Image (cartoon, coloured by chain):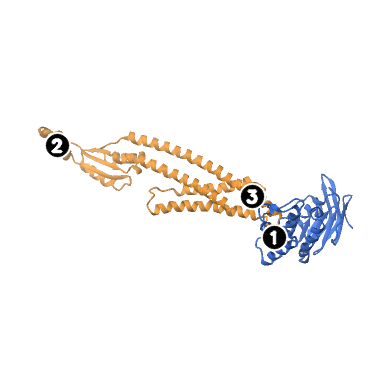
Chain colours: A orange, B blue
Amino acid sequence: MRSRIFLQIVVVIVFLLLWNILIIGKQYQEELSSRKLDDVPVLLYSRLFDDLVDLKQELETQDYIDHVEIQQDTLIAQELIEVYKLESAFEVLKNYKLPSIGQIFVKGIKFNKAKYQQLQNLIFEKYHGISINYKEDLLNSLEIRFKLLEKIFFIIAGVLIILALIVVSFLRIHFEHHHNNYWQVFSQSGGDPYKREKIFWGDSIYLTILPMILVGGAYWGLQYKDLLPYKIDLLYLGIEFGILIFITVLSRLILGKKF
Amino acid sequence: MLRVENFVLSINRKTLIQTEHLEVKSGEKALIIGNNCSGKTYIARTLHGLNTKYSGNIMIKGKKIVLYKRKKKTLLVQNFPTYLPNETLWKNLTLPIPVLTTRQRQRLYDFCEVFNMKSIMKQPASILSHSQVKALELMRAVIQLPYLVILDDYDSYFDDVNRAKATKVLDFALSNGSAVLATSNNRLDGFDTIYRIKDNNLVKM
């Protein structure tokens, strides 16, 4: 009888692992896509160098900013002359005042459309002389990709949950039916009529708590050893536990008065 | 131990058995005899608490039988086998006992000795004959010392020799305060009280 419980525990663990791999897989995909933003800076132009310096100071406290680089107008002019060999035009360029340039390098995993909007608002409200330029298409395509990823995640998660409900409940009911004759003889021969019920709920504790402890323990162990860079929301672990409890209750209801 | 008063057992509004009074005292053996289809099994099952559609009172140790229904204070040995063929005889004997005491273990050895089954205690119960299965069930019921041991169709699974052996086992229960009620087609020796089902009436002989 114990070996059958062991088999059920293994099946539950497999489902929990698949579910958690799915959660981590989604995070991995999101991160992979977000990393593209790391290499694409937000460009700033301003004739007022001091504004750019002030903005840099203000932005460096934001969690989605990696770093800000500013290039002064004189340096830009010098660079242009060197790169394009414009020594003869030096006098002409000297008479023109070029804008200073700022480059905001963002942390892709923390940057999104809302943060970009926040950045735009800050510049428009406080730094009127700064112009901003960014590949917004990239943000839009990322947003579409995230929405798609989320859809795929929920579909696979839903399928997994339904599969777990069917397979684990079926196993539970199958094994209980398999023991019907044993319990009938046990009860008719004078055995404790509540023993089957007690064993059912005792096994349920094993089937819900043990896999959660093993999978949860493995997760926190990997986190502790810094082997897993992704975090699983406690809410997801709570949902997994809730589903296991639901499966137990569902199985008991399907078994009905047979106990 | 067992008191039945103003008892009427009906099926489809037709009276099957009725009796004003039936009593089996602690340490006493009673027999109910009747022809086939006279309702012996039905009354045995009712006294065991498996049927509640009756009128009148069934009291065990002064309390209504419904209070004992789930506590198994009565044990019923029926005509059909109730055992696990793939388990050993010993496992079948000790199946309902939560913690087997040394005294119970010794007593079961003694019972098996009586039925010449000691040498096959570790064998699978599938090798047992029908009367050996009934002996197993009898031993298993007696070792638990219920208030009342009910043996349905007692004459159908034991011949005279085995009945004498069964009497020895039952004596253990009787000497420890249990009562025994058997049903049978024929009149059997060794019972303190005999009741007969005649014309739907259960009467003391």
Q: Nearer the viewer, residue A25 or A52?
A: A25
- In which chain is the residue bearing label 2? A
Instruction: Judge if badges 3 and 2 mark residues of a common chain.
Output: yes
Q: Chain of mark 1?
A: B
Marking on residue B119:
1
Q: Are marks 3 and 1 on the same chain?
A: no
* Disc 3, SS: loop
In the displayed structure, A72 sits above or below B89; it is above
Q: Amino acid at mark 2?
A: Glu
Residue B32 against residue B173 in the figure, above or below: above
Could you say where residue A160 lies in the image, as x and y percent from the top left? 50, 41
Quadrant hosting residue A27: top left
Labels 3, 1: front one:
1
Q: Earlier in the sequence, mark 3 or mark 2?
A: 2
Residue sitting nearer the eye, A177 or B119:
B119
x%, y% of residue A10? 52, 49
Q: Label 1: state its secondary structure.
A: helix
Choose top left, top right, bottom left or bottom right for residue B179: bottom right
Residue underneath mark 3:
A179
Residue situated in front as seen by the camera: A151 or A76: A151
**Residue density around tag 1, few if under 14, some if 14–19, many if 20 or more, within 10 Å:** few
Q: Secondary structure at mark 2?
A: helix
Tell which tag, 3 or 2, sits nearer the viewer: 3
Amino acid type shown at disc 1: Ser
Name the residue: 62% across, 46% down: A253
> What residue did someone put label 2 on?
A82
> Which residue is rendered at x = 23% and y = 37% of the image?
A45
Q: Name which residue type carries label 3.
A: His
Q: Chain of mark 3?
A: A
Could you tell me which residue is drawn at 29 percent across and 40 percent down?
A: A39
Q: Nearer the viewer, residue B128 or A165?
A: B128
